[in-house]
Image (cartoon, rainbow, N blue to C red):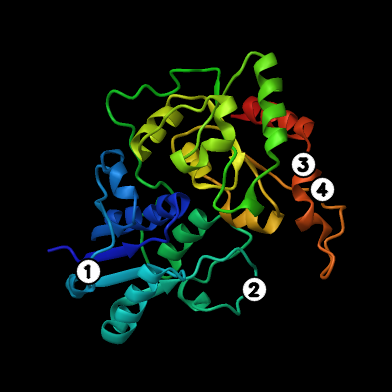
Amino acid sequence: MNKRAAVFSCLGLGDGLISLVLSNNLKLNGFDVTTYHPSLASLQKWFPGLPILPFPSLGELARFDSLFLFFEKSLQMQAVIQECQAHFPERTRILNPIATSNRDYPFWEGGRFDGRTPFAENLVRFCKERLGFSRLTKECGIVVPEGVAKRAFPRRVVIHPAGSRLGKEWLPKRYDELAAVLQARGWEPAFVMSPNERAPWLHQQPPALASLGDLAAFVASSSAMIGNDSGVGHLASALGLPTLTLCRSKQAGAFWRPCWSRGFVLYPPSYIPNLKGVRLRDRYWKELISVRRVLNAFLELLTRA
């Protein structure tokens, strides 16, 4: 009988997709693994070999031989962490995904992640070096279901202008300018976002995507993706689209960039001072990334895809 493992993901869409890299490696090495995430269960048919469920009751934790928890401060995750530390410490590994080269943060020892390397690649190294796995993959296990035509719209470029917080979002007016330039060159820019993000973007006529499954199908049938550091970029990359990510800092981009398909990350220019107490690059990163620079990076990305 295979050992049973549980993987508890952080709450974001990108977090969930990356956590499935760990789940996929556990499966490849003989575990019956269940991934817990608050919303990814709606994409279950896109992950036929990897069961995904919402967070369980704490009483269900005892049935697992191994418990892998991605640290975050949400109430759900903190409850699981406290339960596992109190009752199953020998079965529990807590991994803290932070984009830093430092080693002085909580639970660094659990994963020994290198902030200079994408998180998904860190997980592969974790599986090899810390878990001793011989069969390794960087794939998250996503499979496009029947009935969804990949790249059916070869000129459609997905644009995701939203993010988990305002500080991660490039200037809205520049997304509008970028869309106009792309359209003038024969591309079909398509703005996608969750229902609660639509209001500021109605002038771009975003499609009504009622579920994560609708979003995944729309992205899979497109040809490329441009957007902020967000889960949609990870989804596009996992589905094989060339992906251009706009990011506040090189450090964050190095760790959190999508890395399943060909992709670039744009940061503000390194010659802009970012000294402690000033942080000009961090404060003005949105203004420091021009539409022309994004367009040029996008065109270069396509030549290499």
x, y percent for residue 256 = 57, 54
Mark 1 or 4: in front is 1
Placement of 200 over or under 30, stated as above or below: above
Please state if 295 lies on the left or on the right of 13 as rendered: right
Count the numbered circles shown: 4
Q: Does label 3 or label 4 sit earlier along the sequence?
A: 4
Q: What's the amino acid at mark 2?
A: Asn
Q: Does label 4 or label 2 sit earlier along the sequence?
A: 2
Q: Which residue is mark 2?
A: 102
Please state if 165 lies on the left or on the right of 93 as rendered: right
In what element is the residue under mark 1?
Answer: loop
Tell me whether the residue at label 3 lies in contact with that at label 4, contact meaning CB atoms closer than 8 angstroms: no
Q: Nearer the viewer, residue 71 or 78?
A: 78
Q: Does label 1 or label 4 sit earlier along the sequence?
A: 1
Q: Nearer the viewer, residue 46 or 4?
A: 46
Placement of 169 over or under 6, stated as above or below: above
Mark 3 or 4: in front is 3
Q: CA distance from mark 3 to mark 2?
A: 27 Å
Please state if 222 lies on the left or on the right of 294 as rendered: left
